[in-house]
Image (cartoon, coloured by chain):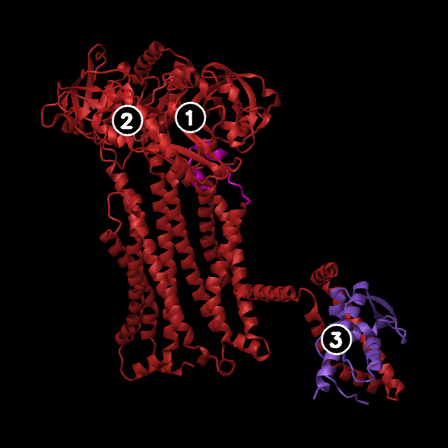
Chain colours: A purple, B red
Amino acid sequence: MPAPQTDLLQGTLDLLILKALALQELHGMGVSRRIAQITGGAFDVKAGSLFPALHRMEQAGWLTSSWGESETKRRAKFYALTKSGKKQLHTESERWERISLAMATALRTT
Amino acid sequence: MISRLRALWNNAFRRKILDRDLDEELQAYLELVSAEKMREGMSPEEAYRDARRDTGGVEQVIQSVRDVRAGVWLDKLVQDVRYGVRTLAKNPAFTLVAMATLALGIGANTAMFSLLDQVVLRLLPVRDPDQLVIVRETGNHYGNTYGANTISWPMFEDLRDNNQVFSGMFCRFPATVTIGYDDRAAQIPAELVSGSYFPILGVVAALGRTIAPDDDAVPDSRPVVVLSYSFWRSYFDGDRTIVGRTIALNSHAMTVIGVAQPGFDGVELGIPAKVFVPIMMKTEMTPHSDGLKDRRRRLSWVTAYGRLKPSVSLEQAQFSLQPLMHSILEMEVQQPEFTRSTTPADRQPFLRNRVELLPGSENGLREYMRKPLWLLVALTGAVLLLACANLANLLLARATAREREFAVRLAIGAGRARIVRQLLTESLLLSAAGTVVGLALAFLTDRVLLRIYLPADAAAEFVVSPIPDGRVLAFVVGAMVLTSLVFGLLPAVRGSRTEITLSLKDRSSALSAGGISLRRMLVGIQVALSLLLLVGAGLFVRTLRNLDSLGPGFLTDHLLTFRIDPSLNGYSDEQTKSFYQRLDINLQTMPGVTSVGFSAMPLLKGYAWQNAVLGKDFEGAPIEEQPVLSEVGPDYFATLGIPIVAGRAFTAKDVGPAKYAVINESFAREYFRGRNPIGQRFGLVDDMEPVSPDIEVIGVIPDRKYRDLRETPPAQAYFPYLEGVHFRFMNVYLRTQVDPRQIEDELRERVRQFDPHVPVVGLQTMNEQIGFSLRTERLVASLSAVFGGLATLLAVIGLYGVTAYTVMRRTREIGIRMALGAMPVDVIAMVMHEVFILIGAGLAAGFSLALALANLVRSQLFGLNPRDPLTFVGSAIVLTVAAGLAGLIPALRASSLAATTALRHE
């Protein structure tokens, strides 16, 4: 069931990952499925974009990772938001809302 | 920030763990995805394959994760370096040659620069050294002077008390004193200092206290001494109880009050002061003269220093001191000592004398070494440039040979920028390796050079740190980076321009023509620089030869000299005179010695005693240069081998009340114009009292050099030494039958037995002394000869390489020509034609460069013009022959090719 592919804007992926991790810690696959879930299947994040983003955000100090056990009883890496990650989620959300509001207004104007 | 740093750290040093974790993470991901697919009904194999496909290639994911890691550039750098090391190691011959070239180039430059830095550029180790200035008087000086930077004591006091620009002034006078402690006696350099010396310099005591203004208020009142830190460590083994104890200086008991801070050896570089004494103790420290008490205004002996007020610049200060100086001079011309020794015509030029301020770190050694050192820095710079050109050439050749490798790398997706970076990394690796070796070389070289330059004991204490200081390090790193850019950038850019298809298709046609014009240009530059260095070498070597072969005008072989200073041992005038007479007789009877001569002034050491002369026939004539004077023993001329051309030499009977003189031909010509000089009379002008011409000329000697080998012999007059005023120390000259070095030890022992309290100082052969005085010329000549040879060698190698390469590229063409009937001679002519065009262009550039720069070295030359045609033409011939031969080898090889072989080539 190939979902309609939407190109991710620069920075959108980061915001989606932050949002996906807002409730609970997840492993990589979990993040991908959670994003699909919360966007109604609009975004299917592939490993090739997901993992570089996760590692980059971890280095930026927004995420922290720990090793846990997956549903398949395998060692898996779980990601969680840090304090600065939560702050980043907050500011990014606000920014995004401003942009989307502006875009919506712009597009609605005839 | 912290998380980034931690990530950087992890990426740099825990890569293995990170990579394993990443593997595991992705593996877990794959399993989760396939488990999901299995739940949807796929078979396990199918699910796993599908999952892998979905992921889009595990390797690619791993690579893109690595690319976002912090410090990925570091990663790539490490890769480049590793690859570079491997490539260089694969070609050890090339690497060694390149490294050695760079080590020589960078080493020579570093050695010269750190010497320049330590000797010429560095400031004194005191507080705010850039505020410190030397205050001196320029213009005509009448009277006696101890050197260009000195002024009289009363003038110092006037300047100190009346200026508005200095926060303080001090003065100093260097002297040699005999120190006695624990039955040991030695002569050491001392610094006589005013009470403000230490406070104004900001130099503090490491132990005890320094000399304070109180210690220097009343003449002869405070017999105190401060030791230099290094002298305290070496002579007193760092004994902390030394403060408060008494040592003997010139047989006067002096109390040690302190030790100066480490690293401070007085204000004159090259002659480190070991002890500091209040200048009010001058009478005790310099028994042979006392300018302090007689307050003569026409005796310049102290070096005066000022510390500029923070808001005042050197130029402002110099400007605002002129009126003060002028008022001092106005007062001085009224003094009887001035009116007595000069004519009214001398007054106007004298009143135009000015104050000049010099940077406080200035001194004689600096003055003396500045030009030669800058010259050597320039020479080594040219050598480094040449080495760069040579390396660029080598790398270009190598880049051509590696075109296939670059093509492969480009084909599999390497960016051109990455290839440039790779090649630059290799260049940087080469120059870094060269720099490390060069640094070691430089350190060794500097030790040797300092030993050549400074007297042995000063060199031993002149600390050249093996760890270069900030400035030298900056220079070295700068030189390294610049060098690798200069020689690496061109080949790198060329390498990255490799045409993929051409290079991969066919090896031989890939020997592209593009690099060759660049390489020819580089060879041209090498030829030009070589010519420049060869011309320099020729000029300096011939200068040295001129100085060596001209000589002083008397035989310097079998001549031994030393200095003796009985007055420092507290001998009275009568005792001193008797000492000389007895020593004279004693030495004359020494086996192997044929003759003994005494002289108050040292010969060929740059010193001169000059004084104005008066006589009834030349009164009022303008003085061009005052004659040079000395006081000598009866056998002085005979010992040096200077003949008497008229009249007679002194005898032991020439003692008062009549005064006699022996003059040289120049003196006779200048003062007695054409008359028989024998029996003429003249007098020496005295500041203190009027004199009459009462000295009778009894003999004439030919003109001989006196101060140094470069001079035109000045007018000279000699007086009997026991009747003179400068008899408190003497220079002794011994003519020997045997090699003078054989009897040095015996002589020292003989004098010690004669009088154990009076040490023999500076014992050496005349040739050694002359050799020392020519050390700069010798150093410049030998180094420039080495550099010139090296440069020629490099240029010849470069020319050979380019010619051989051209011939190889044209093999096919040559084959066709020969098949069509060209003779070997034609082939040779064809190749050599290009070679000579190249040499000609290089020579033309080199000539114009050399002609333009020639004037800069004029002052370093002797007996020849800086545009000396013989040197220029000779250098050009040498270079042309050497380079021509280098070109001839490939030309001959090309001509001996059989046409069939040549055509089958490729």
Give the CA distance from mark 1 to mark 2.
Answer: 20 Å
Considering the numbered disc 2 on the image, is that residue within a helix, a strand or a loop? loop
Q: Chain of mark 2?
A: B
> Label 1 amino acid?
Phe
Mark on residue B173?
A: 1
Give the CA distance from mark 3 to mark 1.
Answer: 81 Å
- Residue visible at 21% across and 13% down in the picture: B654
Quarter-wise, where is residue B765 in the image?
top left
Q: Position of residue B623 (x, y in %)?
A: 20, 29
Q: Chain of mark 1?
A: B
Binning the other alpha carbons within 10 Å of mark 2 as few (below 14), some (14 to 19) or many (20 upward) gives some
Above-or-below relation of B861 to B899: above
Considering the numbered disc 1 on the image, is that residue within a helix, a strand or a loop? strand
Quick one: which residue is furthest to the front in this view?
A110
Residues at circles 3 and 1 in contact by the CB criterion of under 8 Å: no
- Residue visible at 39% across and 34% down in the picture: B321
Above-or-below relation of B845 to B703: below
N-term-proximal mark, 1 vs 2: 2
Dot 2 corresponds to which residue?
A: B142
Residues at circles 1 and 2 in contact by the CB criterion of under 8 Å: no
Above-or-below relation of B558 to B248: below
In the image, the segment drawn in magenta is B445-467
> Label 3 amino acid?
Arg
- Is residue B9 visible to the viewer in this orientation of the structure? yes
Q: Identify the image quadrant of the C terminus of chain B.
A: bottom left
